[in-house]
Amino acid sequence: MAATMYRAGSAVGKALARARRPALVSLQRSQGTMSYAQTLVSMPETKVTTLENGLRVASEDSDQPTCTVGLWIDVGSRYETEKNNGCGYFLEHMAFKGTKQRPQAALEQEVESMGAHLNAYTSREQTAYYMKAMASDLPKDCSSPWILADVQNGSLGEGVDVILREMEEIESCLQDVCFDYLHATAFQGTPLSHTILGPTDNAKSLTRKDLVEYINTHYKAPRMVLAAAGGVNHNDLVSLARQHFSGVSFEYEGDAIPVLAPCRFTGSDIQVYDDALPLAHVAIAVEGARWASPDIIPLMLASTLIGSYDVTHGGGKNLSSNLARLSAEDKLCHSFQSFNTCYSDTGLFGMHFITDKHNVEDMLHFAQREWMLLCTSVTESDVVRAKNALKTSLIAQLDGTTPACEDIGRHILSYGRRISLAEWDARIDAIDAKTIRDVCSKYIYDKCPAVAAVGPIEQLPDYNRIRSAMYWLRF
């Protein structure tokens, strides 16, 4: 979930952008002539240094004129209780209200004068605060991510108003609503069922004491990564980190280190009928793999084989994805996407589609058929196509200093290290069709799915019928 953004728009920012433009064009041209193999070996090294208090500093110097630097924290809505659910998201917005050292007006003026972009997001297991600016402004950037250290001067009233407005916006985005319902039913009774924003009553009742307690409980140096990408010198970044972050505590009161409660997956469904809505949103998922599981690569390839589709896309009968081709030719849906969401100890492998009320049952039938084909009929030619698409996607996702910085922060928190593109490439190449069939059979075949549906869904089969389509009778 993104917080308020301050974008480059000042005269200073535009002048700096113009001054640097030739270098950017030159860099893009040089990268455009590189082969895939050259791209892998030319990726900058990710350097990691751990400070005395346990905070990790990780950076990638790509010698670009811009840089992104941010603080990634191992905490999200999964660490919250029913009473304080939404606390992390509330803090994210409070940070943009200013601190003792930087009142809101001063913070906005500082960011604007650099022509920079300041942003933040909260997920179910991680929180991030980051800034993109000119590499020459790195000393100023480095202090900016730590704007959450002091919330005492924040205006709770303004924070509540912003969050309530965003809750209204989320409620109008049925895809987000559908995914929240999916988590609510798939992980019912566990912290992963919590929404990131929290309930409206919590947003109105959270106090400054709740926020400070949340910070004191979870914002500890060993659970933080100061990540940077772009024109960044690692030694300079480490020096700045020691200057600004050495005071971050690594001790827990009474040695009460928070431990994540295990989250069990429950095959179940939740259906919200609303005939006033023009389209139906349906999400179906099985329990997937955790971040560190060796099964994530086969599942990523399987998700790539299912693919995605939107009615505005071209291709028609020439689309490579079977389901996309059917959707285009038979007008089964307006859009669909396959997803493979990973958490520290579990995951969701599934599909979300948007369709009209007349095609809900047919679309679900063909979606589940594709899952059965993954378990039984994937060929080597299918795998070659999926590998090429996945490799391209992994490279495209790192196009820019901000996605590279995010990749560093997430990897250090999730894996304890940055996994290079070359290593991903080797892992992908090691997968064959039999591996995908075996892994998909392990996670999908004859498993109880979780289903969430919103809108005109009269055609949606009952859960027993959906469950019976999770296997094929073979003789």
Image (spheres, grey):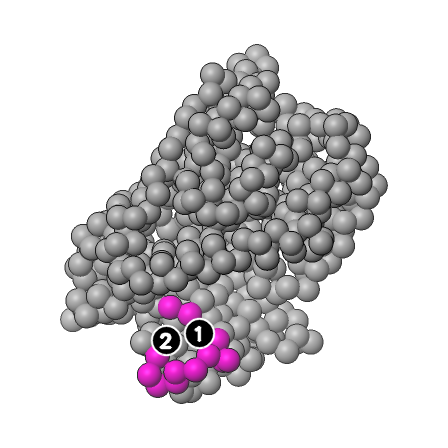
Label 2: how many Cα within 10 Å (few below 14, some 14–19, many 20+) = many
Q: Secondary structure at mark 1?
A: strand
Instruction: Identify the residue at horizontal 68%, vertical 64% (top origin).
Output: 172
Name the residue at the top extreme. 254
Q: Which residue is mark 2?
A: 323
Residue 408 point in image, percent of width and height: 43, 41
* Residue 115 placement (x, y as % from top left): 66, 49
For the residues labelled 1 and 2, say whether their Cβ atoms are less than 8 Å apart.
yes
Say which quarter of the image contains residue 170: bottom right
Magenta-drawn stretch contains 310: yes
Residue type at tag 2? Leu
Residue 108 in the image: above or below residue 457: above
Cα–Cα span, label 1 and label 2 = 8 Å
Name which residue lies at 33% across and 74% down: 321
Q: Position of residue 199 (x, y in %)?
A: 69, 47
For the residue marked with disc 1, what is the amino acid? Tyr
Q: Residue at x 59, y 18 (%)?
A: 247
Which residue occupies 46% across, 44% down? 230
Mark 2, secondary structure of its residue = helix
Is residue 285 on the magenta stretch? no
Residue lying farthest to the right in this orientation: 157
- Residue closest to the eye, 425 or 361: 425
Looking at the rendered image, the quarter that the C terminus falls into is: bottom left
Taking depth in this image into account, of 359 and 388 the one nearest to the observer is 388
**Bounds of the magenta span?**
307-319
Residue position marked by numbered label 1 in the rendering: 309
The numbered mark at residue 106 is: none
Q: Is residue 129 left or right of residue 211?
A: left
N-terminal label among 1 and 2: 1
